[in-house]
Each structure stands twice: as C-alpha cells, then as structure tokens.
Image (spheres, rainbow, N blue to C red):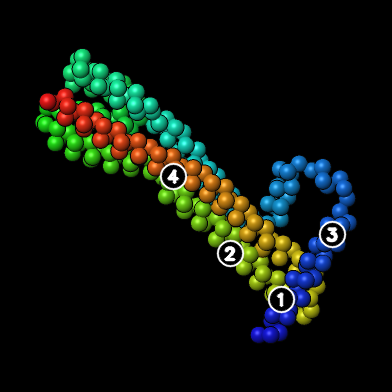
Amino acid sequence: MKKGFSIMAVAMLTILNVGVATAQNEPAADAGQGIHQILKEYFIKGGPEFMGIVLLCLILGLAICIERIIYLNMATTNNKKLLANVENALASGGVEAAKEVARNTKGPVASIFYQGLDRMDEGVENAEKAVVAYGGVQMGQLEKNVSWISLFIAIAPMLGFMGTVIGMIQAFTQIEAAGAIDASLIAGSIQVALLTTVFGLIVGIILQIFYNYIIAKIDSIVNDMEDSSISLIDLLVRYKK
C-alpha cells in the first residue's frame, strides 16, 4: 500500500514539473489563439468517449433550459391588471364578459380565472375547487421537463469523474508495464483524466445556473397564481352578494 502511494506521489510530481516546464517554453503566439480553438483542442485531447457524452448532456440540458425560459416568460402576465379587467367585466357584463377577458389573456393565471368563472353557475365553492384543481395542473405545466435538467447536472460531473478514474487506471497500468515512471508515458492518460473532470464540472455549473433561474421563475409565477386565485375567490364572493 505504501509503495502504491509513493508511486502515485512521484507520478503526480513528475507530471506537474513537466507541465510547468512546458508552459514556460510555449511560444507566445499561442496566447493569440481564440478561446474556441483552445476549447476544441482540449476537447479532442479529452477523447470522444466521455467528452462526447458530456457535450450531449450540455446540448440537451441547454435546449430544455431555453425552452423553459421562453415558456415561463410567456407565462408571466400583469396579474393586477388582469384582475382589474375581470372585476370591471363582472360589474358591467357579468360572468360571460369576465370569461371573455380571461379567455383572451395568455398565461396560467388567466386560465385559472377562466376555470373558476366557468363554474360560477354551480356556486362559489365549486368555483373555488375548480381554481385549486386547475392550479395544480398549471403548476405541472410550469415544472415540465425541469427534472431532466437536474439529471444532466448530476450526470455530467459524474461522467467527468469516471473519465478521470479510467485515465488514472490507464496511467498506472502503463507505469506497471514499463516498470518505471516516465512522464512522457503517463502524461497523456493523466491529462485525459483531468480534462474530462474539468469539462464535466463546467457543464454542471452552466446548467446549474440556468436551473436555479428557472426554479426561481417558477416559484415567482406560482406565488402570483396563489395570490391571484385568492383575490378571484374574494371577488366572486362579493359578486354573488
């Protein structure tokens, strides 16, 4: 066991020394490379097996994030204005006029209002039940596919770590086969191992930022839905009186 740890320590120190020396001797022209070219080179060095899967997680995760952000922004409405319009329609044209206002307004709150107004002929209690039930349906629509984003956030770093473990196994297999530690022999395997981890973590961080934004947006819309639903029920109670 101690011998294994000693080999690992010597190998890592050797790679670090080689990396520092290489970085010092690199021509200054490399600094002029575009960031996309550098990422492309590192991606190719990381190997297609794990890097391709990590990239797929990023593409699918971003696609879902963009779709959710667009949907949530379209679902955001001026609920105070909508409530005022419904109240004015109830006062001037009755329930049918209020339903028309809700029907012509986009967003989950307007849909909830329409379901509640559509049950007004059955009484305020039934209208309230319809509002609560349809509110749950709208919450499900808001949270659609969000669980896939969290899955990609978890998978990408795990794939990176798996690539790291496999790369380290390959490096020590090469050391064992050679019978000695040669930096040029194991540097490639260790570099692949570290690159897969870096890219996996980058993908996880990017998707985590989008995920937190989406969750915060959903919470904001749900709070508005609950507040507006309570205001609608109060409005229907006053209208029935």
Q: Quadrant of the N terminus?
A: bottom right
Distance between mark 1 and mark 4 Cα atoms: 43 Å
* Kind of element beneath mark 2: helix
Indicate which disc, 2 or 3, sits on the residue closer to the N terminus: 3
Indicate which disc, 3 or 4, sits on the residue closer to the N terminus: 3
* Kind of element beneath mark 4: helix
Return the residue at label 3: 22
Residue 56 appears anywhere in the view: no
Which amino acid type is shown beneath numbered disc 1?
Met
Which amino acid type is shown beneath numbered disc 3?
Thr
Return the residue at label 4: 215
Distance between mark 3 and mark 4 Cα atoms: 44 Å
Circles 2 and 3 in contact, beta carbons < 8 Å: no
Mark closer to the observer (2, 4): 4
Residue 162: numbered disc: 2
Return the residue at label 1: 8
Which amino acid type is shown beneath numbered disc 2?
Met
* Kind of element beneath mark 1: helix
Indicate which disc, 1 or 3, sits on the residue closer to the N terminus: 1
Tally of marks: 4
Q: Quadrant of the C terminus?
A: top left
Residue 133 relative to residue 152: left or right: left
Which image quadrant for residue 139? top left
